[in-house]
Amino acid sequence: MENFFTDNEDIQLIFKNSDITELIDLKEGDYSDSEEFDYAFTDARDAKEGYREILTLIGEIAAQIISPLAPGIDEEGCHFNAGTVTYAEGTKKCLDVLRKSNLMGFTLPRKYGGLYLPSVIYSLSIEMVSQADASLMNIFGLQDIAETINEFAGEEQKEKYLPLFSSGSVTGAMALTEPDAGSDLQAVQLKATYDEADGTWHLDGVKRFITNGCGDILLVLARSEPGTKDGRGLSMFIAEHDESLVVRRIENKLGIHGSPTCELQFNNTKAFLVGKRRMGLIRYVMALMNGARVGISAQGIGIAQAAYLEGMEYARAREQFGTAIINMPLVYEMLINSRVNIEAARVLLFTASEAVDLKRGYELELERTESPSKKLRQKAKYHSSLAALLTPMSKYLSTEYANKVSYDMLQVHGGTGFMKDFNIERHYRDARITNIYEGTTQLQFVAAMGGVITRVMEPELDRMESLFTEDFQKPYLKELKEKRELLSKTIDYIKQKEDHTYQSYHSGRIVDMATKLYTSYLFLKYAPFSDNKKKTTTIFFEREMPEIEKNYAVISSGRSAVIDECEALLNGE
């Protein structure tokens, strides 16, 4: 492919046929930036055309510069010597190109040198960078760190750090995880001490598994309140990488070799409080993690897209029993299912990103409005709830499908796929981390469960149903309504059972039902725009509607053998 944007039929379809005027208008306000910045937009139409140009540029860079360097980056990896981390030569070249193309301040306000682009465009960009080199995304995609500073830090901190991120002169890291605090961030123990004499904070302790921990600017979660043991004692800090902050090691990983994962030792490291004390976990990290999860969703799709294209190329070229293996039903089933998986994950991610943009947009509108109306407050609350639901649903679907597609495409390659002669083994290794970091799939189920149980997505389903007037859509709409009723019955059953263990045990199945149902609606929404989309819609329905029925049957059966017998079986009886 010469361009990962213009050569991708599905991305083109979604971008062209999505009305994102509302989120653009909310983001740009009165478009007054155009009076000060020559690259700012004058209206929504101008903005969408500008987005197309930026996506085309990234698609070209990803395909023609980053992708050819990716095998060498994977082979070389990162270097560690006496506390100093050095990127692979290919990574340095890629970052230099992205800097010179002014793509490192993607979502930041223009007054700090940023492009001020929405999440929907950022997600598509991350996908294309990840398709080229998944490990580079772990540096490029850490722009959420700067976004968090922009959202919660004081103006003095913004003016100091955000122009540095926008120019690409610094890279960042979010230092959350510790040896004894992985997913359970309430257990963080890194100590933050306030020095009354000079009015500054200092950090002491260890962080582990920190992506790009060698970055220049770190957002650090630390315990600022002595004697506390839960999340209410944690605050967020900015720390600059100096001699007091030691990289003790970098991890020897299965994949994502171009991205250094570091263990850090803070030794009385000077730090600056972000926002308010005690809000580090309960507000700031939650916002940071949601952005990061959207990014990992896009990374998963990019890896899956790369793996799928490798599988297609090999299946067309490889002959067995007198024919190319792409003509064999058991092979082309894997290929077609992979394509459908990617399209499902992509449309859900795009919609989740829209929800994030609308959430932020309405929050901005509340700030701009002196006396906001009840309707405006309700819209802000609704889109916040929808974003909180769709973000973990997208992370779950994208990363599980990334693993499935990579697995199947290696299978298409047969024994040769297991060798380092082909790119597919790299994609297979890179995919595995996506449904682990930034919250495992199991944690995404937990995060999404509340929104599913409270039926957050119901208004969106009602809205989409009102749009399904095409002849192609009508038969599927009847089926969707039936499956929607099954989900509703499932939710009622779980609520009436009033058994937390049973609900937790089936949370994955319930969230899967909701995710596949919502994604089915999205397929049907875009189906009229191309014959190929109609075909993939048909396949998705044929494949997933029985799965929704199966999950309903399992959950509503009331059977609980795994719960009942887990203690005996796990204890070896």
Image (spheres, rainbow, N blue to C red):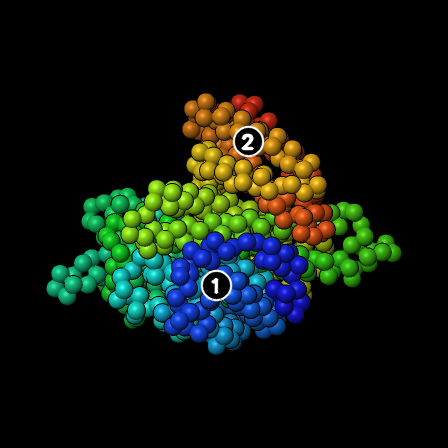
Mark carried by residue 84: none
Residue 323 higher or lower than 169, as above or below:
above
Classify 10 Å Cα crowding around label 1: few (below 14), some (14-19), many (20 and above): some
Residue 325 higher or lower than 115, as above or below:
above
List the residue tagged with mark 2. Answer: 487
Residue 242 higher or lower than 558, as above or below:
below
State the residue at coordinates (69%, 52%).
Answer: 530
- The amino acid type, in three-letter code, at marker 1 is Asp
Measured from the top left, where is residue 258 in percent x and y?
51, 66
State the residue at coordinates (12%, 64%).
Answer: 197
List the residue tagged with mark 1. Answer: 43
Mark 2 falls on what kind of element? helix
Q: Nearer the viewer, mark 1 or mark 2?
A: 1
Classify 10 Å Cα crowding around label 2: few (below 14), some (14-19), many (20 and above): many
Looking at marks 1 and 2 on the same chain, the residue that comes earlier in the sequence is marked by: 1
- The amino acid type, in three-letter code, at marker 2 is Leu
Task: Check whether the beta carbons of the residues at disc 1 and disc 2 lie within 8 A of each other.
Answer: no
The picture quadrant where one finds residue 420 is bottom right
Q: Is residue 437 visible?
A: no
Measured from the top left, where is residue 147 in percent x and y?
38, 60
Residue 142 higher or lower than 555, as above or below:
below
Measured from the top left, where is residue 266 in percent x and y?
29, 62
